[in-house]
Amino acid sequence: MGCVSTLSLHERGQIKALSTTGYTVKRIEDVVKRSR
């Protein structure tokens, strides 16, 4: 299994929303991992 996974549209939307509200990359990673 590779480390790179493709993001679903939902995850991409989440990341975009979180990044525009000022979340750091690390926080976004934590949120997305938890939602899986």
Image (cartoon, rainbow, N blue to C red):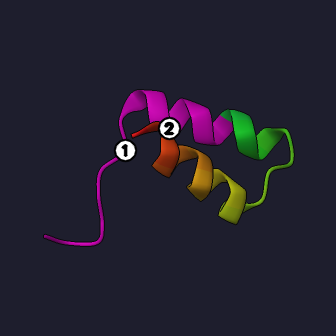
State the SS at label 2. helix
Q: Which residue is mark 1?
A: 7
Q: Is residue 7 left or right of residue 12?
A: left
Q: Which residue lies most toward the left here? A: 1
> Looking at numbered disc 1 in the image, what kind of residue is underneath it?
Leu
Q: Earlier in the sequence, mark 1 or mark 2?
A: 1
Q: Is residue 7 magenta?
A: yes
**What x and y, as percent, mark residue 5?**
29, 57
> Looking at numbered disc 2 in the image, what kind of residue is underneath it?
Arg
Residue at x 58%, y 57% (from the top left corner) = 29
Residue at x 70%, y 57% (from the top left corner) = 27
Mark seen at residue 12 = 2
Mark seen at residue 16 = none
Residue at x 56%, y 30% (from the top left corner) = 13
Q: Which residue lies most toward the front here? A: 34
State the SS at label 1. loop
Image: magenta residue range: 1-16
Query: Image quarter for residue 20?
Result: top right
Q: Is residue 31 magenta?
A: no
How many C-alpha atoms fall within 10 Å of the one at disc 2: few (<14), some, or many (≥20)?
Answer: few
Taking depth in this image into account, of 14 and 31 the one nearest to the observer is 31
How far apart in space, not on screen, are marks 1 and 2 (Cα)?
A: 6 Å
Location of the C terminus by quadrant is: top left
Q: Which residue lies most toward the right here? A: 22
Q: Would you say the residues marked 1 and 2 are in contact, meaning their CB atoms lie under 8 Å apart?
A: yes
**What x and y, as percent, mark residue 35?**
48, 37
**What x and y, as percent, mark residue 19?**
74, 46
Residue at x 85%, y 39% (from the top left corner) = 21
**What is the number of callouts on the image?**
2
Q: Is residue 10 left or right of residue 5?
A: right
How many C-alpha atoms fall within 10 Å of the one at disc 1: few (<14), some, or many (≥20)?
Answer: few
Q: Is residue 8 left or right of residue 12?
A: left
